[in-house]
Amino acid sequence: MKRIRFRKLITYVVCTLGAITLIPQRSEGAVVNASYDGEWFIKILDPENIFVGGLIELNDLNKRVPRMVPNPRPPMVTIGGPIFGDIVEKNLLANKEDMQSYQKYIGEKYGSQSKHTTMRFLAGGRERKNFNFIHYTYGQIVDLKQFFAINQLLPAHKSIYYYEIRRWFYDFAGLYFVYENSDNDPVEWNDQLGVVERVIYGRDAMFVVCSNQEELEVKLALEGAIKHGFDKLDNKSKALLYTSEIRVNNSGKAKVLNHSPHINPIDIIMKYCDTPITKEDYGVPVYMTLFRFDEHRTTFLNDFSEDLPKL
């Protein structure tokens, strides 16, 4: 497992807050540390149980939805992101109840402003020959049947394309230098444990399209549906998407897995992602970063690649 040691954790936290404004494109097979693929940023598959400061067994990332336990050394938590004009600091306990209560507070206070300040990202479609890229993108082994309704490793169709809509509102980041002055009972360092150091909240959806059509035709139809809506497509593009197999996974309320003439998941997902923060719907945890629970607090980097072994 690769590791990078940061001398100044605060510099890292501040710099990564600024990284929200950029998503660089990644060439095939290359690793770009500033990207939101699964090397630094790990997709959250269990948003109800994730909180800053929580401990995760790192081996769980490659087996199942990770289990989280409370941290006896809770950090100070900094709140920031696109919807804030400045960074707000709160001394929060490391448990999911506090995280959820502050989420609600953000929705109540900033909901009316979010439509002017939130950002929306589109990760372009790429052709794939199997579903291994999903594990790499999410930063962990993903149960394809559970999260995408995919039952086979290799598709029956000619090619696979995927798009990801990423819209992030705010994040919680832990300031872990308070460990040295903690009054809590000491715990033994363990480099097999990961500490959740940052949780990004918003709306995020990935949809996978399996098609027998040519790459350019599929991409044009998908981009047209994403940018202008399914109803604005010509009949040829509509027919292409109707005959394709579409699978969707998202972190919010738009629970759509199948595409049929009666359900258009692309329009449903775009409508969901375009909805601003409200008091009732204020985003969910979509990505997180971890560091190892060792004396050096080294950032956890996943060593997944496109060439994963067959599962």
Image (cartoon, helix red, strand yellow):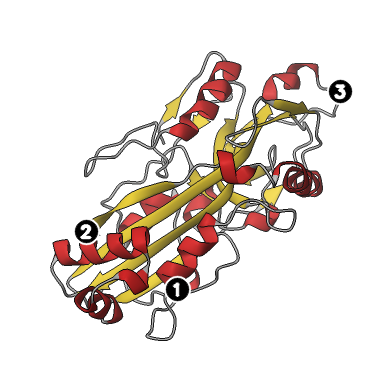
Q: Earlier in the sequence, mark 1 or mark 2?
A: 2
The residue lying at 54 percent from left, 71 percent from top is: 255
Alpha carbon separation for disc pair 2 and 3: 53 Å
Give, as a three-letter code, the residue at label 3: Asp
Q: Is residue 192 left or right of residue 225?
A: right
Residues under numbered marks 1 and 2 in contact, where contact means CB atoms less than 8 Å apart:
no
Judged from the image, the secondary structure of the residue bearing numbered disc 2 is strand
Give, as a three-letter code, the residue at label 2: Glu
Q: Is residue 43 left or right of residue 187?
A: left
Q: Nearer the viewer, residue 118 or 213?
A: 118
Which residue carries the number 2 mark? 127
Alpha carbon separation for disc pair 3 and 1: 45 Å
Which is closer to the viewer, label 2 or label 3? 2
Alpha carbon separation for disc pair 1 and 2: 21 Å
Q: Position of residue 275 (x, y in %)?
A: 57, 57
The residue lying at 41 percent from left, 33 percent from top is: 22
Q: Is residue 263 left or right of residue 73?
A: left
Q: Nearer the viewer, residue 281 or 164?
A: 281
Crowding at dot 2, Cα within 10 Å, few <14 / some 14-19 / many 20+, comes out as some
Judged from the image, the secondary structure of the residue bearing numbered disc 3 is loop
Vertical arrangement, residue 202 with respect to residue 7, above or below: below
Q: Position of residue 89 (x, y in %)?
A: 75, 26
Which residue carries the number 1 mark? 145
Residues under numbered marks 3 and 1 in contact, where contact means CB atoms less than 8 Å apart:
no
The quadrant of the image that shows the C terminus is: bottom left
Give, as a three-letter code, the residue at label 1: Lys
Q: Earlier in the sequence, mark 2 or mark 3?
A: 2
- Per the rendering, the mark at residue 183 is 3
